[in-house]
Amino acid sequence: MKIKRLLDKLSGILNDKRKAQIKKYKSLKKVLKALRNEKTILQETLARTNDKELQHEIESRLQIISAQRKKGLKVLKELKKERKG
């Protein structure tokens, strides 16, 4: 793994496009992690809530987060293919 990181750093220095890809990849991973954390919190809240209106609101937010994560994961896979290719 150390060699791969060193090669990534070297290619980042030599290639601005690759550097931008790596930056986008890392920031996207952070966003996806935050969405995953928020999703688990909402699921726990949903399990504890008895109010129907609040449950409906939480379920709507969970659907939105799920859609955002699916889109983000798709973009992440594409970026990963570009990095390797």
Image: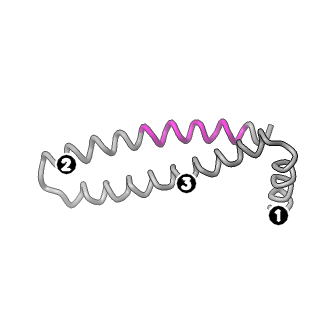
Assess whether mark 1 and mark 2 are in contact (beta carbons under 8 angstroms): no
Give the magenta range. 67-81
Q: Secondary structure at mark 2?
A: helix
**Which residue corresponds to the image point at 24% horizontal and 57% vertical from the top-left?**
47
**Which residue position holds label 3?**
30
Q: Secondary structure at mark 3?
A: helix
**Which residue position holds label 1?**
2
Mark 3 nearby-residue class (10 Å; few <14, some 14–19, many ≥20): few
> What's under tag 3, amino acid-wise?
Lys
In reply to whether residue 58 is colored magenta, the answer given is no
Marks 3/1: CA distance?
Answer: 21 Å
In reply to whether residue 70 is colored magenta, the answer given is yes
| Badge nearest the viewer, 3 or 1 | 3
Lower position in the chain sequence, tag 3 or tag 1: 1
Relative to 11, is 26 on the left or the right? Answer: left
Horizontal and vertical percent position of residue 40: 38, 57
